[in-house]
Amino acid sequence: MSGSSSQGSLHALADRWLPKLVLSPTLAASLIFVYGFIAWTGWLSFTESRLMPRYEWAGFVQYQALFENERWWTAAANLGLFGGLFILFCLLVGLLMAVLLDQKIRAEGMLRTIYLYPMALSFVVTGTAWKWMLNPDMGLQKVVVDLGFTDFTFDWLVNPDMAIYTVVIAGVWQSSGFVMALFLAGLRGIDDSIIKAAQVDGASLPTIYRRILIPSLRPVFFSVLLILSHIAIKSFDLVMALTGGGPGNSSDVPAIFMYQFAFTRGQLGVGAASAMMMLFTIVAVLVPLMYMETRSAKRV
Amino acid sequence: MFKNLTVGRALVYAALLLMAIYYLLPLYVMLTTSFKSLDDIREGNMLALPQLWQGGAWSKAWAEACTGVECNGMQGFFWNSIKMTLPAVAISTLLGAINGYVVSMWRFRGSDALFTMLLVGCFIPFQVVLLPMAQLLGLLGLANTTAGLVLVHVVYGTAFTTLFFRNFYITVPDELVKAARIDGAGFWTIFFRILLPISGPIFVVCIIWQFTQIWNDFLFGVVFASGESQPITVALNNLVNTSTGVKEYNVDMAAAIIAALPTLFVYMVAGRYFVRGLTAGAVKG
């Protein structure tokens, strides 16, 4: 009897510290590799580090250099342009497809599979495929010219003014199916009785969607916005594979800027400063979105 | 709902079909191009089928194509990616399972705050950790090694896997665990005897998600690996963007499909779980 009770208290003791012990390696890793490394990068951005890291405080010189760098502003403007269009078109295409697929479609499963498979691909593969499709000599331009429209040109890939839009095309192709899946799941989660009641009241189908169903997707809408802006701000591989940031620097984005200054040009300080700017951008975009998401989720 | 409006219904189907063509077109073009000869590519139409189906580009992409200085094709890099992905997926998934178990079933004072702290790792742009990580891998002698990449993927993947398992385990009724504790079951007994047996679906979701993420990663690969140790995404980019001489589009396309095959295969056999993972990771992550 006494043996089993002492064993019981041993159990209780183990159960008290085991959970903490088990969690601690991951917590330690998070403290070092996430928080510690952010602090480290932050510190580097305030030093004169170039080829090698240095740790003497130098104030805002790197940020000054960054903000005086025209290429940085090209990259930032491209991010705004690409991010805005990418999010807009993903939302439009995704929502439209979700509504269309919601009409008791035959072969819905097969269509969904087709719309979503790009999500399984690496952005490098997507970039490679679209680079070939958009090839001005042998790609889609030639297809249209061969059809008899001899004056047709579609040279966005090599046109400095248009190259960033090719990233939008490929990005939307890759991610819009995913947006469709999220919206469709949202639509399916809505109570049928609401729709039936509206139908009894004589509301037409478009009205039901416009006034009842789509507004009730608000929480999904915020999640989608959150994910898409996250993808946009981090976008690196797609641009690298599709345009390499070119022609020239015309389709540069902050992630490529950071990579090149930190790892191929030996300008650690500027690279660190640009990485910190990316972090601030994510925080500035995501925190308000998360706030709105939790608020709208609570209300529903 | 459109039952009586046949024109409307036809339009819906037409629109859906058009979208399907738009999504399938790049895959079709990649496949057909990879089986064409270079002359066929130069003279023919991108949308046409090959005049003569040839597999030469595939064997070249696998074994002979140049990715920089080396000309051994994608094969070595394909194995690199496998050697990197399998351990990283296994370790991060197991860690996630145990972490998720703790933060959902064994909450202690401050555990919610710690979980939130962990989750921040899902949101940061990885650019902000690249420079210190490169320094550390250098110090540890892990720079340019597959082991180094495994470490990086485990460290930054565990936040996601913890989230997956936590969201799954909070749906398990508390009574189940409480009853087991009254019966004298301890921390590990409850995990192995009660929770693991019902965790099959979430393991599938988590493994598929991690596999796709890690296999498709480019950023960590290009920064922390070079030459021989590169994963396949980096090798593909090198092949497509830095090769000199005659551009062999058929080889590029074959290489791209080779790089995409494992994740496409997973998507085809377990697409249902794939979508569930995406939505689960997305809605909460």
Image (cartoon, coloured by chain):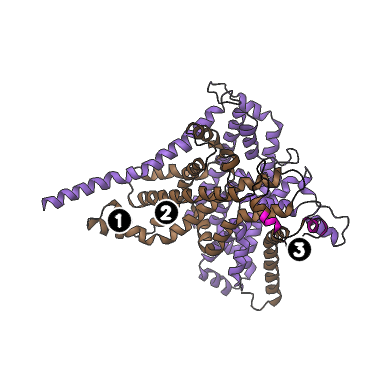
Chain colours: A purple, B brown
Q: In which quadrant is the N terminus of chain B drawn?
A: bottom right
Secondary structure, mark 3, is: loop
The amino acid marked with disc number 1 is Ile
Residue receiving disc 1 = B190
- Chain bearing tag 3 is B
Residue receiving disc 2 = B165
The reply to whether discs 1 and 2 touch (Cβ–Cβ < 8 Å) is no
Residue A160 at x, y percent in the picture: 77, 42
Residue receiving disc 3 = B50
| Circle 3 Cα neighbour tier, 10 Å, few/some/many (<14 / 14–19 / ≥20) | some
- Which one is earlier in the sequence, the residue at label 1 or at label 2? 2
Q: Quadrant location of residue A89? A: bottom right
Estimate the spatial distance between the alpha carbons at disc 3 and disc 1, rounded to whole Å: 59 Å
Residue at 38% x, 56% y is B169
Residue B50 in magenta stretch: yes
- Chain bearing tag 2 is B
Q: Could one spot residue A105 in this view of the protein?
A: yes
